[in-house]
């Protein structure tokens, strides 16, 4: 699926509207950005955010009112606390409708890799453990 990003013209329009000040919370969007009602941000706006996540909308952007010019922090907050869970849910619903069932089986190899990663299996870590235990540490031949 292609992403519908804002056109340069739309970005310019949003910039003009925001005057490069974060627009998070504008038009009752405070909750989406983790802000209290009426709260405004004064940081420099750097990114263009889709009010409705692009992955959920699937239509072309027609108006700059569909986006907000926001600071990086607020873009990240909304993406992680709002958009990602909604996208994941939409995906699950789509898959269910399409009759796709997710495997409940754990992949043994992946589980084993996780265990190894948890232990810390890198050679450097192993050398460190050996040294701590007072065991002879093989030297690298140079
Ligand atoms: Zn902000």
Image (cartoon, rainbow, N blue to C red):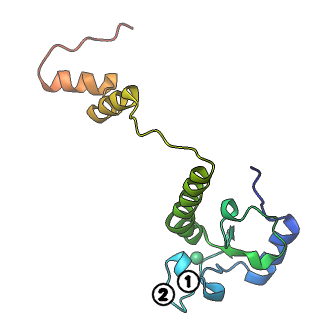
**What is the residue that sits farthest to the top in this orientation?**
141
Q: Position of residue 75 (x, y in %)?
A: 59, 68
Q: Nearer the viewer, residue 10 or 136?
A: 10
Relative height, residue 124 to residue 45 (above, below): above
Q: Which residue is drawn at 49% across and 77% down?
A: 34
Q: In which quarter of the image is residue 49?
A: bottom right
**What is the residue that sits farthest to the bottom in this orientation?**
38
Q: Where is residue 33 in the image (x, y as percent from the top left)?
A: 54, 76
Where disc 1 sits, the SS reads: helix
Q: Residue at x 23, y 26 (%)?
A: 128
Q: How crowded is mark 2: few (under 14 residues within 10 Å), some or many (20 or more)?
A: few
Q: Position of residue 43 (x, y in %)?
A: 59, 78
Instruction: Give the quadrant of the C terminus.
Output: top left
Pointers 1 and 2 in contact (CB under 8 A)? yes
> Disc 2, ligand 1: is the CB inside 8 Å?
no
| Quadrant location, ligand no. 1 | bottom right
Q: Is residue 64 left or right of residue 28?
A: right
**What is the residue that sits farthest to the left in this orientation?**
134
Q: How crowded is mark 1: few (under 14 residues within 10 Å), some or many (20 or more)?
A: some
Tag 2 residue: 36
Q: Residue at x 28, y 28 (%)?
A: 125
Relative height, residue 65 to residue 80 (above, below): below
Q: Where is residue 98 in the image (x, y as percent from the top left)?
A: 63, 49
Q: Quadrant of residue 63?
A: bottom right
Tag 1 residue: 30
Where disc 2 sits, the SS reads: loop
């Amino acid at each position: 699926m292609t992403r519908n990003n804002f056109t340069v013209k739309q970005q310019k329009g949003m910039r003009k509207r925001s005057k490069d000040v974060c627009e998070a919370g504008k038009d009752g969007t405070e909750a989406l950005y983790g802000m209290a009602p009426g709260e405004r941000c004064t940081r420099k706006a750097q990114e263009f955010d889709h009010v409705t996540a692009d992955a959920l909308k699937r239509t072309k952007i027609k108006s700059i009112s569909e986006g907000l010019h926001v600071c990086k922090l607020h873009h990240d907050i909304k993406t992680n606390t709002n958009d990602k869970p909604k996208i994941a849910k939409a995906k699950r619903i789509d898959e269910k409708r399409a009759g796709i069932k997710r495997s409940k089986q754990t992949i043994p190899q992946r589980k084993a890799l996780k265990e190894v990663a948890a232990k810390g299996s890198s050679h450097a870590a192993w050398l460190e453990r050996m040294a701590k235990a007072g065991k002879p540490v093989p030297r690298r031949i140079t």
